[in-house]
Image (cartoon, helix red, strand yellow):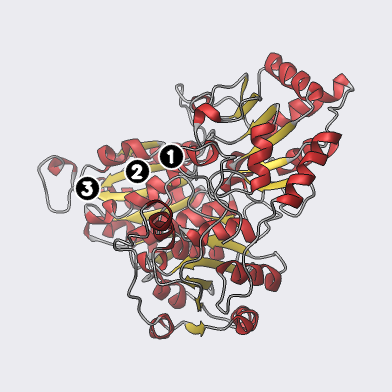
Amino acid sequence: MIGAQILIECLEREGVEIMFGYPGGVVLPIFDRLYDSKIKFILTRHEQGAAHAADGYARSTGKVGVCLATSGPGATNLITGIANAYMDSIPMVAITGQVKTFLIGNDAFQEVDVTGITRSISKHNYLVKDVLDLARVIREAFHIASTGRPGPVVVDIPVDVQQAECDFVYPREVNLPGYKPTYFGHSGQIKRAAKLITESKKPILYIGGGVITSGAAGEIKELAEVYRIPVTMTMMGLGAFAGTHELSLGMLGMHGTAYANHATMESELIIAVGARFDDRVTGRVSAFAPHAKIIHIDIDPTSISKNIEVDVPIVGDVKNVLGQLLEAIGRLKKKPDTHRWLEQIHEWKAKHPLRYLHETGKIKPQYVIEQIYEATKGEAIIVTEVGQNQMWSCQWYKYNRPRTFISSGGLGTMGFGLPAAMGVKLGCPGKIVFDIAGDGSIQMNIQELMTVVCNKIPVKVAILNNGCLGMVRQWQELFYKKRYSHTKLCNPDFVKLAEAYGAAGMRITKKENVREAIEKAIEIDNTVVLDFVVEDEENVYPMVPAGEAINRMIGGMA
């Protein structure tokens, strides 16, 4: 086989059903072989869209997402999407074309050093210089991307390697002596953690995206319910524990619930599971959870005590470790007494609920999200852009199952939502998929409307149109004396734009029309763009100012 054929054969054997990308000169041998492949290829309108679509597909299905681009600008257009997947630990394989091997380093047409550029934003990367290595590299790439702490792997393939011939041998096993993730926790540390839990009066479970990746939602539920431990989630952890559960505290951190932040700061024991103590969660590190001992469970040893010093570090796959921990606690035949602690949390919930002013004569963005929740009965998959729309989606839609909230966490990538929603809908065709967007963020990759329409991928886009870059404007209002420097937007007619792409478009300016428009959009078998003209100076509250402790919040009501 030639290298391009070997690549396609390996992708098929890895179970790849869908991939996203854009053709170009040095990947034509691959595209020629894709012509006869059973893999469904989605031609995006920009390579960044391809990376985000592969990312969304991976997040919603748990499978490895795959994207493909040509060399030079095609490869560099993937960079933001690769970095986004890396920050959020998403399994992805990004395949790029490269100039002929003898031209590498000569500044050839459309040559860039892809492996050099992606070294710091990928879990691993390869430059394949010999066709004999290609099958092994693809096998390793999928293994590395999907095991341990997942992440994107980049495979750069020169065009002459794609054209070279060799006998094809598919590697049945992967042999990487330097790569051996730890999957079970140390028994001594498990015992220490179990003892701390049974003796604790004020414990909380602080859970992140690792719980979803590991498939450990069932173990979290058992630990919380049997031992009556309240649960707070990072943004990446939303859905890992039911948002409607009585023990749920919702999201914590900069825009978390007041009661989650108060509980974290007053807790005597934090059981951190698959979370990395991001700065948006901790606030001022020196003031974070001053009374708490911390148990930290994570498959990545470099994440433990990286941002916050912990008392009981446990390295391992969180599903396995939680299973061990439940057994160890059971053997102690003792439960923590959390009765008074839960009463205190109930008081905080009653005193500091999420709220906003309803009757102002304008559409409130929170109301739009509430109506999407009610119209979909909480059964939709919500994808977001980045900004105020993202935070309101975290607060006002309740996620009861894993992989139902899809958003850019660590990198905070504007333009993520629409292409990611495409990948989500392809991975979960039976689900209603909403992209909740800001009018600024949606325009970053709005060209992907053509992709979803052409491929009959009926996503629903709800634009919270406040005429500005909302989150940046909020900071300018609160901390820069309302000096709105370049945050006011001059927007297109989103309805006409949607129709130009072949989608349906609706503009909603009155509160009484919100629910009707959402229900109509759900019924339409096409991509629908809902342009909700919302309150222009609405803010996301609560809010923890930068550098403050997380119980030092600004307001609970706009």
Helix, strand or loop status at disc 1: helix
- Confirm or deny contact between disc 1 and disc 2 (CB under 8 A): yes
216 or 279: nearer the viewer? 279
Q: From the image, tell me which residue sits under label 1.
A: 141
Labels 3 and 2: the sequence-earlier one: 2
**In front: label 3 or label 1:** 1
User: 480 or 274: which is nearer to us?
Assistant: 480
| Left or right relative to 150: residue 414 | left
The CA distance from mark 3 to mark 2 is: 15 Å
Residue indicated by mark 2 = 155
Amino acid of disc 1: Ala
Whether residue 540 is situated above or below residue 431 in the rendered picture: above
Q: Which mark is residue 291?
A: none
In the displayed structure, would residue 384 be above or below residue 163? below
Along the viewing direction, whichever of 366 and 29 lies nearer the viewer: 366
Quarter of the figure with residue 431: bottom right
Amino acid under disc 2? Val
Q: Is residue 462 above or below residue 420?
A: below
Residue 160, labelled with which disc?
A: 3
Label 3: few (<14), some (14–19) or many (≥20) C-alpha neighbours in 10 Å: many
